Image (cartoon, rainbow, N blue to C red):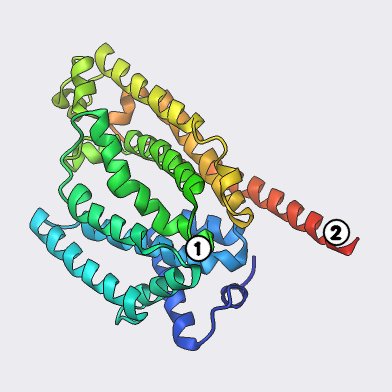
Amino acid sequence: MPTWRSTLDRAGISGSRLRNDYTHAARRVVRREPAPYLALRLLAEPSLVPWLAAGLAFMNLVDDVAETGTPQQRNAGLTALAERVGAALETGDNPDPLLRAYAHAVSTRALPAQWVSRFLDGAATTEAAFDGFGTEEDFQTYLDDYAWPGVLVFTGLQYQGGPDAEQAAGWRRFVDAAQRVDFLADLAGDLADGRLCIPRARLAEHEVTRADLEQARDTPAVRALLAAEARRARTALEATDGILGLAEPGLRPVVATMAELMAHQLTAVERAGAAALRRDVGYGLVAPLRTLARARTGRSRQAVARASSKDR
């Protein structure tokens, strides 16, 4: 794995202040989401890593503000953040090194600003005021307004000029699957925090109450509801086939790893059944390490093959 200094060099990031800004953003990701950062560092083309690290740090920052405090505090925090982000994108400068790094990444990679503004707008409306979904249509609106642009403010930086329509649509399918798996895996923790992320209409279809879920009642109706939600997630996951072909070659090992871990987590949710109401379903330790090692080996073989091809 290249050093961080050489990674910045390969991305063409020069100047001590700017390099420090990207380092600050990367360290924030390490503290909050070490597994995705490790996947980026081990598997992604080094020239892409600083842009994506800055994007992930920015996405996490917005998420944190949108989920912290009372609704009034969240709204005020997001309003202030949107003003700071707008100024940073316009001028390229800001007191916050994370926003300086992200503004530089957006400018250098020419990511359309609409994805950033759309994500911030969704954070201030859809996410900050989240009180669950009434129907599947509400869930799809949540994806369009918040989750999809949230993914593209990060993954969109892999593309010089931003994603085209086909690439953006591919990531829309990916986030649909990822969000369904995430909501099921985090069901126990979300319920403990007062969040119900299964549409209320589907509870009614199965004659399950919110209290049934909050009290982790292991009943036939609850098991049927959770099994149906897992099937929906599995169908959405199958619909992401083809995402590798839409990703930049330098990011494909990371995307393949994300998809494999998502499938592994969904399988764990399916096996857990009603137990998923008592504790969140994580990846475990062995599966991520095995997946990363396999992906790393595959990436090394590809690098050797490319080098051999150049020598011929």
Residue highlighted by disc 1: 161
- Which amino acid type corresponds to the residue marked 2 in the rendered image? Ser
| Callout 1–callout 2 Cβ contact below 8 Å | no
Residue highlighted by disc 2: 308
Secondary structure under tag 1 reads loop
Q: How many labels does the image show?
A: 2
| Residue 256 appears in the picture as rendered | no
- Which amino acid type corresponds to the residue marked 1 in the rendered image? Gly
Residue that appears at 22% across and 71% down = 83
Give x and y (percent) for residue 65. 23, 60
Residue mark closest to the camera, 1 vs 2: 1
Instruction: Point out the tag, 1 or 2, that comes first from the N-terminus.
Output: 1
* Towards the viewer: 90 or 237: 90
Residue that appears at 14% across and 26% down = 211
Few, some or many residues within 10 Å of mark 2 (<14, 14–19, 20+): few
Secondary structure under tag 2 reads helix
Q: In this view, does 113 lie above or below 205?
A: below
* Towards the viewer: 31 or 100: 100
Q: In this view, does 51 lie above or below 297?
A: below
